[in-house]
Amino acid sequence: MQKCSLCGGRVVNGRCEECGMPIPPEHTYTLRGESAHYHRVNDEDVLHRVRPTGSRPAVSGYAEEERTAHLHDSGSDRHEAPRAVVRTARRAGIRTAKRTGTAAWSLITAALFLLLPALYLLLQRSTVTPVPEPPLPAEEQATEAYSNAYDDLRGTVPAAGADWDGSLTAGLYTVGQDLPEGTYTIQCAEGNTSIDLHIVSDAYGVEIYEDLSANGYDAIDSERDDVSLPAGTVLFLTGNGTLYFHSSNAQVDALPTETAPNPLVGDTAYTLSDSDESLYLLVGEDIEPGVYDVTCTAGTGYFSFVLPMENTRTMYCSAWLYGDPDYVDTLRHITLTEDTEVTLSNYSDMDFTVTLTPSETVYVHE
């Protein structure tokens, strides 16, 4: 009967009944010329190999019958008492190993029970997406963004000044010329207003984009308060409607009082057919340098140009223009300097026509 090499249990169908360990079957083999048979010793089958006597060398001092009898007798004697003692010791060792293996499995099982909850939590943390914190209310978000956007401009305008009110439509304006330096409240002047306000202060390195609308949105979308606009700041407004500006510390005494007639005369119109996508015009060659009012009289598209700034920076200006017999979009006070590239882009299936008319106001600089 085959025994388990780990715990000594009985092997049935290739597996130990005690510990469940798989045990391969024993292979019985004999050498060439040998015969094999089993003896029953201590309730176990013991394999006994026998070589043919004719092949054994002669042993001096023994007759053949005595040598054979001696071998069998001594073999029988050895299997009687001594082997029982050895087998008992081996069984004790197996029982000890069995108890040790059982204790080891118990320790491993207990450790797994202790570690499984921790592993489960770790797996949850690594696979479950954390729930983000709820966002700030819209008013707090707008206030925080508004506060950060104008930090570099606060304190740049004198605290004392005069009251000033004015309204601006879509166009290009310069603080200190078209409106006085000051700290402003800016709001939509009427309903159905949607204005994109692009603010660039080249001296302080600030560029801000604002979207002010009064079409049923929250009031926070239609007004900006505490907006410092130092002299030299450029405002580019696009869209439809009017923005109202109010300041209590406006530096009205610094506004220029002299203007000159615009040297430009006559309108210039450029038309893109429905098959044309873009038209590029170079100021100084295709267009005379100057200050223009730009009006879309037909179609839909973009009018864009780059405005040079004093500190070797530029301000990119782009406006969506629409025109039909009942309504036209106009950009006022567009300053086009020499070597500036103007781009007209058609976004409709009809002709896109843009007309440039000399503006009425041109400031005189000493």
Image (cartoon, rainbow, N blue to C red):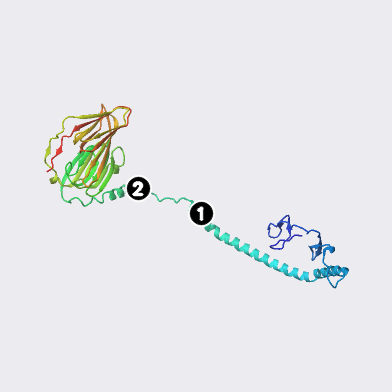
Percent coordinates x, y for residue 327 in the rendering:
26, 29
Query: Vertical placement of 365 versus 49: above or below?
Result: above
Looking at the rendered image, the quarter that the C terminus falls into is top left
- Residue drawn 51% across and 54% down? 123
Disc 2 marks which amino acid? Pro
Tell me if 250 is positioned left or right of 65 in this view: left
Q: Quadrant of the N terminus?
A: bottom right
Which residue is more in the foreground, 314 or 133?
314
Residue at image location 26% in from the left, 46% down from the top: 207
Residue 63 horizontal/vertical position (percent): 87, 70
Q: Residue at x 70, y 68 (%)?
A: 93
In the displayed structure, 250 sits above or below 286; it is below
Res. 116 image quadrant: bottom right
The residue tagged 2 is 137
Q: Quadrant of residue 180?
A: top left
- Report the residue marked by disc 1: 123
Q: Would you say 196 lies left or right of 181 here? A: right
Is disc 2 surrounded by few (<14), some (14 to 19) or many (20+) residues within 10 Å? few
**Nearer to us in this view, 12 or 52:** 52
Return the residue nearer the eye: 4 or 27: 27
**Front tag of 2 and 1:** 1
Choose between 352 and 339: the one closer to the eye.
339
Secondary structure category for the residue under label 1: helix
Q: Closer to the N terminus: mark 2 or mark 1?
A: 1
Give the spatial CA distance, label 2 vs label 1: 34 Å
Q: Secondary structure at mark 2?
A: loop
